[in-house]
Amino acid sequence: MNIAARQQINHQALRLAGQFDVLIVGAGISGIDAAYHLQTQSPQRSFALLECQDGFGGTWRTHKYPGIRSDSDLFTFGYKWKPWMGAPIATAEEIIKYLNEVIEERNLAPHIHYQVRVLQASWSSKENEWTIVARHLETDEIVKYTANFLWMCQGYYQHSEGYTPDWPEMDRYEGTIVHPQTWPDDLDYTDKDVLVIGSGATAATVIPAMSVHAKHVTMLQRSPTYFFPAPNANAMADELRDLEIPDEWTHEIVRRKILKEQQEITRRSFEEPEAVKQELFAAAKQYLGEDFDMSPHFTPNYRPWRQRLAFLPDGDLFREIKAGKVSAVTDQIDRFTEKGVLLESGQELTADIIVTATGFNMCILGDEINFLVDDQPVDFSKTITYRGIMFTGVPNLAWVFGYFRASWTLRADLVAELVCRIFKHMDDTQSKRVTPDLRPDDENMRRLPWIDSENFNPGYLTRSMDRLPSQGDREPWIFSQDYYVERDEFPLADVSDSALKYSR
Ligand SMILES: Cc1cc2nc3c(=O)[nH]c(=O)nc-3n(C[C@H](O)[C@H](O)[C@H](O)COP(=O)(O)OP(=O)(O)OC[C@H]3O[C@@H](n4cnc5c(N)ncnc54)[C@H](O)[C@@H]3O)c2cc1C
């Protein structure tokens, strides 16, 4: 949508539903993390979370496809400050249970306002205040909230529907097409032939879960993905638990070990990609059999880690392939037919159900929420990011955008700590406003894309790059997407640097 052409909602006459120091948008894993940090590091600030769903959990509440689970380990996808007690890979239900414990332990429930959809956020420099216009979904009433600071934890993809390419003649297909993001409650796939389009993390989850009941599942991919099969267990965690080491210690030790191992595999994927590739193949063959031919369906044409590695707990997808319940096809769709899809090779794949595991649409802050600063529409693509958190010309706003290659929550924790340090500096200097602002020497610096596509290039990102903020070529305008860099840099970041302009 043309940002300038968007209609602004006049909030003058709206009922004031709440006034807070900080408003957090979203009660997913990032929003709950932000609330915890406010409580513990900036306890004098009043806050509320505005959430459009009727419950907390975000991604883990809204996704209902068979087998839905994390593909990161929960020692790092869980919070730094709340021990994870289960197996490394967790079901959505287990993640919700973990978040529920946090909400109970921290008494966060009274702070969460459910079924409140944020429509507009407008900043007034005169008042040093955001006015949030929101719809109460139960009553349909449009109300306003005010806050000095806006902490955007609304995620990074469009929650209403997933991404499905526009294939020719899709309407000819007589079977059922479903997208994993909007899974129908009553879909019966028992003894059905299922075609899953895609081979990313979602396909890797849904295929083995469906193949248990389906007649057969075919995985159709345009190009192969790297899979990382391993047992869903952590030997060190099991041993430490057996020794009755306190849970906090076990969590921290195992977390450090996993992070070190991941750092090593990331380094090796750049420096010795062929060796990493051969190790992944060797791991695959433990499940698929020594004689299994890894080409053409399981040999990607890029180096490992350029897209997220799809984890297979206990090698589940490979087990199903070995058992003959799942097969893989690598080809492009020419068009849909009455019975399935016709491939460019001329082969027709028939199915009763087609699952389009083709990803999501990215949602950048202003795609679904109308942002204004002093009555002017904000176009985030014209801004430069301060450390991948704040944006030039946009006061008192932080966005939690996690890691792709490491667990999202590692960054949510780091961002929260930095935001609370900025709050502390605001308190110390009696400032009411903080705005990222280019220093004179930064004016002519190179503007670089939000994410370096050489570093990471999944489809949803490349489709959206022109709508995302830019980064610069020097600190603090760099968004490295590297946990190991930010882990060291963020705690030392000088929040009184002139790149952050404070005012009263
Ligand atoms: C299926 C799936 C599996 C994933 N698995 C992993 C994984 O294993 N590891 C990993 O690191 N990452 C994973 N991710 C990425 C994942 O989205 C994040 O890790 C994480 O859950 C994001 O949390 P969040 O709280 O930032 O956002 P979300 O979980 O997206 O939550 C955002 C919340 O904000 C609410 N919201 C949005 N807009 C508004 C509005 N306008 N008004 C009010 N409320 C609003 C939403 O309803 C939602 O509850 C996965 C993503 C998907 C889709």
Image (cartoon, rainbow, N blue to C red):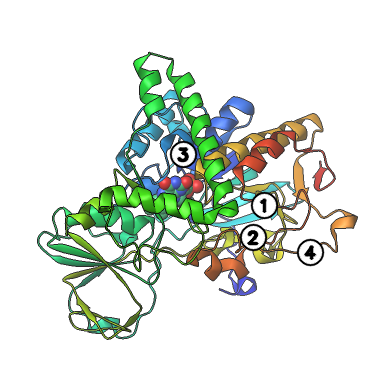
Labels 2 and 3: the sequence-earlier one? 3
- At x 19%, y 66%, the residue is 194
Q: Is residue 66 visible?
A: no
13 sits left or right of 141 in the view: right
User: Residue type at mark 4?
Assistant: Arg
Label 3 sits on residue: 77
Disc 1 to disc 4, C-alpha distance: 14 Å
Tag on residue 450? 2
**Mark 1 lies on residue:** 479
Task: Indicate which disc, 3 or 1, sits on the residue closer to the N terminus.
Answer: 3
Q: If you read the primary sequence from the N terminus, does the residue marked by circle 1 or circle 4 appear first?
A: 4
Amino acid on which disc 3 is placed = Phe
Q: Residue 128 versus residue 206: which sits nearer the camera?
A: 206
Query: Nearer the N terminus, badge 3 or badge 4?
Result: 3
Instruction: Answer whether labels 3 and 4 touch (C-beta < 8 Å).
Output: no
Label 3 C-beta lies within 8 Å of the nearest ligand 1 atom = yes
Give the numbered dot on residue 446: 4
Q: Looking at numbered disc 2 in the image, what kind of residue is underneath it? A: Trp
Residue 273: image location, x then y, percent: 53, 55
User: Disc 3 to disc 4, how far (Cα)?
Assistant: 33 Å
